[in-house]
Amino acid sequence: MTLQETMINQELANIDLSKVAALQQKRTLAFVNHFVLTNVQFLNNFMKNCEQKLMEFERKLEKVNAGMVLLEARLSSIPELNTPSPTTTEVQKAEAAPSEAPTESQNTSPVSAEPQLQQPEEQAPNVDTIEGKVARPEYDRFVKMVQVGVPLQAVKLKLSLEGLEPKVLDEILGNK
């Protein structure tokens, strides 16, 4: 304790509370009512401002969502984007053909059979490799959105809404 606190405590100890006049109840009630009223007004104004900002943010978010829907509709109207690219189908055919043909070499050399068995385990489903890069068809339209000029953050938001990983889009865009 400081010196000032000790002096105040000693003075309070010396006061006879039976000789002190009672506080005016009306005055105390007025102070408490004023305190409660100002705090309630402050909280109401604060809540009103927060609600207005949330509503404004919700309107902006709805505008962005509507813009995304329009942009997706425009992208889906482009026939080149809706058809699978010939490179992915050619790669799929090329991968299917060698795995069927060398059955004799698999039987004769057990060393060459092991890498071919491990290869399908390493690849995730719905993932094709093209020239050492990973191609994910579910991300193709999002890559096109970025190429057309949609802000990257908006595309990432749409990705996460559809349950896909935005980090994969970063990897794809970094590879291309």
Image (cartoon, helix red, strand yellow):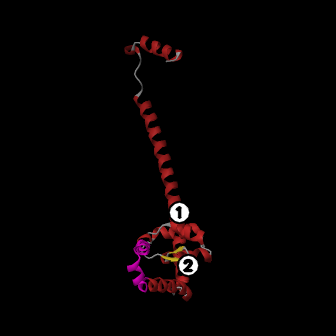
Percent across and percent down for residue 15 are 42, 13
Q: Which residue is mark 2?
A: 71
- Magenta: predominant secondary structure element? helix
Note whether residue 144 is visible: yes
Front one among 169 and 111: 111
Q: Say above or below: 30 vs 4.
A: below
Q: Secondary structure at mark 1?
A: helix
Quarter holding the C terminus is bottom right
Q: CA distance from mark 2 to mark 1?
A: 21 Å
Percent across and percent down for residue 57 are 53, 63
Q: Which three-letter amino acid code belongs to the residue tagged 2?
A: Leu
Q: In this rendering, would 176 be left or right of 69? A: right
Front one among 114 and 161: 114
Magenta highlight range: 99-120
Residue lying furthest bottom: 79
Residue lying furthest front: 108
Using a 10 Å C-alpha cutoff, classify the residue at mark 2 as few (fewer than 14 neighbours), some (14 to 19) or many (20 or more): some
What residue is rendered at 43% in x and 31% in y?
28
Note whether residue 59 is visible: no
Q: Say above or below: 35 vs 161.
A: above
Front one among 25 and 98: 98
What residue is rendered at 42% in x and 13% in y?
13
Q: Which residue is mark 1?
A: 57
